[in-house]
Amino acid sequence: MKHIIAVHDISGFGRCSLTVVLPTLAVMGVRAYPLLTAYLSAQTAFPTGDKAVFLDLTGQMDQVLDHWKYLNAQFDGFYSGFLGSPEQMDILTRCLETYQRPGFLTLVDPVMGDQGKPYRTYTHQLCQRMCQLAAQADVITPNLTEAAILLNEPYDPAPGGEKAGEWLRRLSLDGRRSVILTGLSLAPDTLGAGCYDRETGLVHTAQAPMVEGTFAGTGDLFASVALGRLLAGHDLADAAQTAVDFVAKSAQATVDRGGDPMEGADFEPLLGLLARPEGV
């Protein structure tokens, strides 16, 4: 069993962040140790107004890492998602300085925005700091909005195959890290990802039938599945295709049930698929 540091917030209502990360990785044979960034009463897409609860846990993150160091905890990887402040970026940089070593896998999901716009809390400074953190990663999993921010390019909701390949190579920082670019559609009825594998220098694509709707937490679900496959020794192309297939199946299950996409995709009944060595 692999052991990783999982740096995420946790939402009480709406399946995203750690409520997605922990069960997904567990069924794939990965034990994730949460380094909590914040507690939210509900995922942020809900119109909760002044009823929302937000507990910033930045002040406890260094203390947690100090305790883990005291316990001589050892980890095989690191996985970060949404981050809320430059201080959290600094803490994670110190964390990686402590734990990165040969064979240690660092995946940064550079959560900064969607639909062509940065999230409300992401200032230019915070985006720049996320770029710096992502530079320390072995693998990044940006969506198209985040890729545009990382590259300082105008947002393109549908880059063609040639442009997507160019973006992937640039995002790799001259082959220093692998990239899985999510939200990439190469045909009107498909949606998936493109990836650049730093081990081979090759570009691959992964597509599945498109499911209409916007489902909360699917970015967290995608990155978790991809990470689980990578830690099990599968290559990047396999990890990307497995993640694309599982997210599509989970979204379709939600539609079939008549579920609310804002509450997240119905991934839990399908988790057994991820326990199979051959994947989804």
Image (cartoon, rainbow, N blue to C red):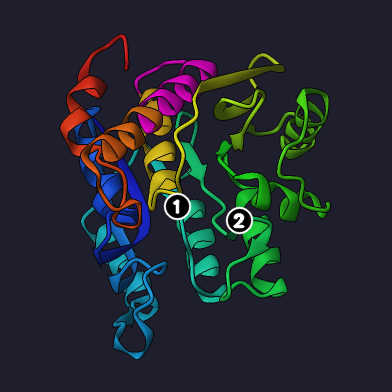
Q: Quadrant of the N terminus?
A: top left
Find residue 133 and name its label: 2
Element marked by disc 2: helix
Q: Nearer the viewer, residue 201 or 75?
A: 201
Under mark 2, the amino acid is: Leu
Is residue 236 rendered magenta in the image?
A: yes
Asked if marks 2 and 1 touch (Cβ < 8 Å), the reply is yes
> Which residue is pictured at 48% across the width and 20% down the height?
241
Please say if 33 is above or below 270. below
Query: Residue 137, position in %: x, y?
Result: 58, 43
Under mark 1, the amino acid is: Ser
Name, please, the residue furthest toward the bottom: 50
The residue that mark 1 highlights is 80
The part of the image, by quadrant, that contains residue 77 is: top left
Is residue 136 left or right of 165 when viewed as pictured? left
> Which residue is pictured at 73% across the width and 32% down the height?
168
Find residue 67 and name its label: none
Query: Residue 222, position in %: x, y?
Result: 42, 37
The reply to whether residue 73 is in sight is no
The part of the image, by quadrant, that contains residue 186 is: top right
Which range of residues does the magenta coloring cover? 232-247
Element marked by disc 1: strand
The reply to whether residue 134 is in sight is yes
Query: Residue 73, position in %: x, y?
Result: 26, 49
Please say if 187 is above or below 54. above
Mark 1 or mark 2, which is nearer the start of the sequence?
1
> Which residue is pictured at 27% across the width and 60% down the height?
14
Q: Residues within 10 Å of mark 1 (few under 14, many from 20)?
A: many
